[in-house]
């Protein structure tokens, strides 16, 4: 193999965006690609003068020739910095000695804190690797590299053919579609037949100018080194396989992004709100075995009554070996609020006198739902008299004071805690939409990081 040209060699900032430029090409469309819209490809990050990929809430993979240091900052965003996270430490493959063409241009950084809300695109492993050799296979390169104007630091993307897979490397692009200075270490993504995406490449070098084919080191080829180095941290980069690519799914082998190229939410929520996520993956074998969630309402007590104006504190315990994706609170047959992060707790305010039936519905990571046993409680009238428990009075279709609750649901967590709570839409015959708001009520302990 020919020695690489200088435009992607160690110490030189490199990123992905390549294309031929024509007189009618907008300035932001450089080397065959386009500027990234806000919250697209959110796992592609800026690190030093290079690009990297968030492959785990605490790990960024980049190229060895970028020589990331322990003082590096990981920067998330597109045209501007939306988040910054310090690294704890970085490790460069000691076997890499500027020997481009060896397919071992690997490095990683462990972050000082987790980034739990950005949807992770998993690393291509096992039988999934066949997707790189499929007819007309294409890859999407993402990075912060140089444009024809000579600038860099803004995220761009380009989709180009996969030309060759050999020597633990992939050749991608050419004919004006490629990376340039600043794209080194950045990701290459491929879409599988189940519509989910995988990241497989680390931009390494080119044998010509920007716009010529890019050579990438393959992530899966370095997995035993990556996971060997990270073993002491207890970090698993391959939730569906072992480090050798053998199918071995865990509870995290699923909920993968189907459309990382589309804007989802904002950087305040990690570009995850409304993201289209898969069920449990079965690309190379059976999906991780699911089981029904265990869910119960631990507060209030069944049959408990409350004085006028009391706030009803609701606590739900839920577990599932796949993990709980969501717990929904259902009052008198209508969805009231939902939460995605334990502890699952709410406070109900402004309840009108009447009898109420409360249930909790869990959704696990395989999108399977389980409903708790119902509990019934009473809000007394202003004169202190009981309403009398009556099943017909808690029927969501009945014309009862219990249906006109005027309730509002507060997320019951510390003010400093991260809240993944939502208020669900009402129907005209159910709970009052105008009075349903989501607030914060500090009576529970701070949430632990996931």
Image (cartoon, rainbow, N blue to C red):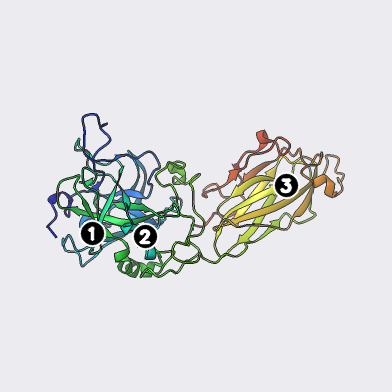
Where is residue 66, by image quadrant? bottom left
Vertical position of residue 36 compared to residue 224: above or below: above
Q: Position of residue 303 (x, y in %)?
A: 80, 54
Circle 1 — which element? helix
137 on left or right of 206:
right
Front position in the image: 95 or 285: 285
Q: Quadrant of residue 296?
A: bottom right
Mark 1 and mark 3 residues within 8 Å of each other at the beta carbon:
no
Q: Identify the residue under disc 2.
A: 124
For mark 3, what is the residue?
333
Identity of the residue drawn at 48% across and 46% down: 275
Of circles 1 and 3, the one toward us is 3
Q: Residues within 10 Å of mark 1 (few under 14, many from 20)?
A: many
Please rate how many residues cluster around mark 2, counting C-alpha atoms within 10 Å: few if below 14, some from 14 to 19, many from 20.
many
Residue at the spot of label 1: 64
- Left or right for 80, reference 382: left
Q: Give the Cα separation between the discs numbered 1 and 3.
A: 57 Å
Report the disc number at residue 379.
none
Q: Position of residue 126 (x, y in %)?
A: 38, 66
In primary-sequence order, the first of circles 2 and 3 is: 2
Residue 265 location (% of width, % of height): 47, 41
Question: Which quadrant of the view contains residue 215?
Answer: bottom left
Dot 2 or dot 1, earlier in sequence: 1
């Amino acid at each position: 193999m020919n020695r690489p040209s200088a435009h992607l060699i160690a110490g030189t900032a490199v990123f992905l965006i390549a294309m031929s430029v024509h007189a009618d090409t907008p300035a932001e469309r450089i080397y065959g690609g386009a500027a990234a819209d806000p919250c697209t490809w959110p796992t592609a990050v800026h690190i030093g003068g290079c690009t990297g990929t968030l492959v785990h809430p605490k790990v960024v993979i980049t190229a060895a020739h970028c020589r990331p240091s322990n003082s590096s900052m990981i920067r998330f965003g597109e045209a501007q910095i939306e988040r910054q996270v310090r690294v704890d430490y970085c490790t460069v493959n000691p076997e890499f000695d500027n020997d481009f063409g060896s397919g071992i241009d690997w490095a990683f950084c462990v972050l000082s804190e987790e980034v739990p809300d950005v949807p992770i695109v998993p690393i291509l492993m096992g039988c999934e690797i066949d997707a790189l050799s499929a007819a007309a296979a294409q890859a999407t390169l993402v990075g912060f590299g140089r444009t024809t104007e000579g600038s860099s630091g803004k995220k761009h993307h380009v989709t180009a053919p996969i030309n060759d897979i050999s020597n633990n490397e992939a050749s991608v692009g050419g004919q004006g579609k490629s990376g340039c200075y600043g794209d080194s270490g950045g990701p290459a993504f491929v879409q599988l037949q189940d519509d989910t995406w995988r990241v497989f490449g680390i931009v390494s070098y080119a044998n010509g100018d920007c716009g010529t084919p890019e050579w990438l080191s393959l992530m899966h080829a370095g997995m035993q080194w990556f996971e060997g180095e990270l073993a002491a941290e207890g970090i698993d980069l391959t939730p569906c396989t072992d480090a050798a690519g053998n199918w071995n799914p865990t509870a995290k082998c699923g909920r993968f992004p189907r459309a990382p190229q589309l804007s989802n939410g904002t950087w305040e929520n990690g570009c995850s709100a409304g993201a289209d996520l898969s069920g449990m993956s079965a690309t190379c074998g059976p999906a991780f075995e699911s089981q029904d969630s265990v869910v119960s309402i631990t507060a209030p007590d069944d049959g408990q009554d409350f004085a006028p104006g009391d706030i009803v504190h609701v606590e739900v315990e839920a577990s599932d070996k796949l993990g709980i994706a969501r717990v929904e609170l259902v009052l008198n047959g209508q969805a009231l609020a939902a939460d995605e992060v334990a502890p699952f707790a709410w406070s109900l305010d402004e309840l009108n006198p009447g009898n109420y039936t409360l249930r909790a519905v869990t959704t696990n990571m395989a999108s399977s739902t389980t409903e708790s046993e119902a509990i019934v409680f009473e809000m007394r009238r202003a004169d202190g008299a009981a309403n009398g428990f009556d099943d017909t009075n808690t029927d969501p279709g009945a014309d009862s004071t219990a249906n006109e609750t005027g309730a509002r649901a507060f997320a019951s967590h510390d003010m400093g805690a991260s809240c993944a709570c939502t208020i669900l839409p009402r129907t005209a015959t159910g709970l009052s939409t105008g009075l349903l708001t989501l607030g914060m009520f500090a009576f529970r302990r701070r949430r632990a990081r996931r």
